[in-house]
Structures are given as C-alpha cells and as structure tokens.
Image (cartoon, rainbow, N blue to C red):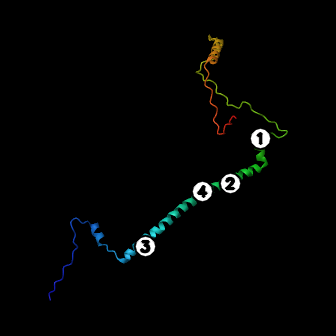
C-alpha cells in the first residue's frame, strides 16, 4: 500500500511580510484570554485612582512628619532657653551684659573709646609740614554767596498731601 503522505504544510509568507507581522497573525484569541484581558483592564481602572491617592497621602504624611520634627526641635530649643532664664546666674549675667547693671558694692568700668588703634603711617609717606599755611579763598564771601543762592532759588512745588483711605468730612 503505497499511500502518499501529504506534504507538511508550509506557512505562506509574502515578500512584504515581516517576522513581527507573522507573529501577530499567529495569536489566537479565545474566550478565556478575552475574559482575562477584560479583568486586567478592569483591575487597572479600579486600582489606578486608589494607587494615586495612596501615593499622594504618603507624600502628605512625609511632609507633615518633617513639619512635626521641625516643631519639636523648636520646642526643645525654646524649652532649653526657658530653663536658662530660670537660672538666677544666667539672668544676672544677662543683666550685666545687656543693661550694664551692677550689684551693690561692685565697681563698674565703662570703656568709652574701644576702637582699635590705627596703625602708624608708612615710612614712605611724606612728613607733615610744620609751616603755617594760609589759604587764598575768601570763605566768608563763599558762605554769603551760597546763602544768597539758596535763598533766591525758585521754590519747589509743595508736596501733595498723603492719600488716606478714610472718608473726608463733607462741609454743610
């Protein structure tokens, strides 16, 4: 019995077809795969807003935690400062430094000129002349001319009164 076996079927590939196109055509959709895709899309639609809300709330929690930590640090600093002010020695020291208070019987010294000493002039600077010098400028005439110029100058416009938001009284 000489039965011819049918030749295996070769897929027909057109010259314009790409390997990706052949792969996409080989996918078959069954009822199960269609249901699974619908379930997957439904899960994304249901969970996406919840995940976004979760991320926003986590961000708010981290911001509020940082604010609480800053406020706790400030409270600790203020508590420490309050404890210092409860110490009598600290209060006395601050009164002496800030207000120049002294206790009865103490002697206080107040330095009037506590500026640093200016360095002496350098050696290459010319020495100060010991001769008496006179100026040829008539300072009295200059003073009189300046006074007259200022007095005879035209007056500037009077400044406008400041604008107020209050209502002005009305004359009857």
Instruction: State which tag comes first along the sequence, 4 or 2.
Output: 4
Q: Nearer the viewer, residue 149 or 16?
A: 149
Residue annotated with mark 1: 96
How many residues crowd around disc 2 within 10 Å: few (fewer than 14), some, or many (20 or more)? Answer: few
Q: Secondary structure at mark 3?
A: helix
Instruction: State which tag comes first along the sequence, 4 or 1.
Output: 4
Mark 1 vs mark 2: in front: 2
Residue annotated with mark 4: 66
Residue annotated with mark 2: 75
Q: Nearer the viewer, residue 139 or 128?
A: 139
Q: Secondary structure at mark 2?
A: helix
Instruction: State which tag comes first along the sequence, 3 or 2.
Output: 3
Residue annotated with mark 3: 39
How far apart marks 4 and 2 lie (CA) works out to: 14 Å
The quadrant of the picture occupied by the C terminus is: top right
Residue in view at x 78 percent, y 44 percent: 92
Q: Nearer the viewer, residue 150 or 159?
A: 159
State if disc 3 and disc 4 touch (CB < 8 Å): no
State if disc 2 and disc 1 touch (CB < 8 Å): no
Residue in view at x 77 percent, y 50 percent: 87
Q: Is residue 116 left or right of residue 53?
A: right
* Number of numbered markers: 4
Q: Quadrant of residue 65?
A: bottom right
Instruction: State which tag comes first along the sequence, 1 or 3.
Output: 3
* Vertical relation: 70 (above or below) 152: below
Instruction: State which tag comes first along the sequence, 4 or 3.
Output: 3
Q: Position of residue 7 (x, y in %)?
A: 18, 79
Q: Position of residue 97 (x, y in %)?
A: 75, 40
How far apart marks 4 and 3 lie (CA) works out to: 40 Å
Q: Secondary structure at mark 1?
A: helix
């Amino acid at each position: 019995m000489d039965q011819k076996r049918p030749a295996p079927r070769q897929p027909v590939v057109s010259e314009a077809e790409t390997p990706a196109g052949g792969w996409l055509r080989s996918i078959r959709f069954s009822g199960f795969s269609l249901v699974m895709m619908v379930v997957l899309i439904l899960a994304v639609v249901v969970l996406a807003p919840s995940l976004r809300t979760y991320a926003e709330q986590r961000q708010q929690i981290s911001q509020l935690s940082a604010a609480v930590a800053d406020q706790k640090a400030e409270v600790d600093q203020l508590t420490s400062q309050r404890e210092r002010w409860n110490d009598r020695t600290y209060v006395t020291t601050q009164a002496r430094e800030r207000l120049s208070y002294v206790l009865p019987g103490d002697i206080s010294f107040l330095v009037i000129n506590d500026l640093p000493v200016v360095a002496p002039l350098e050696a290459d600077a010319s020495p100060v002349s010991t001769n008496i010098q006179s100026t040829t400028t008539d300072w009295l005439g200059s003073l009189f001319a300046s006074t007259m110029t200022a007095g005879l100058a035209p007056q500037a416009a009077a400044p406008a009164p400041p604008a107020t938001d209050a209502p002005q009284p009305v004359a009857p």
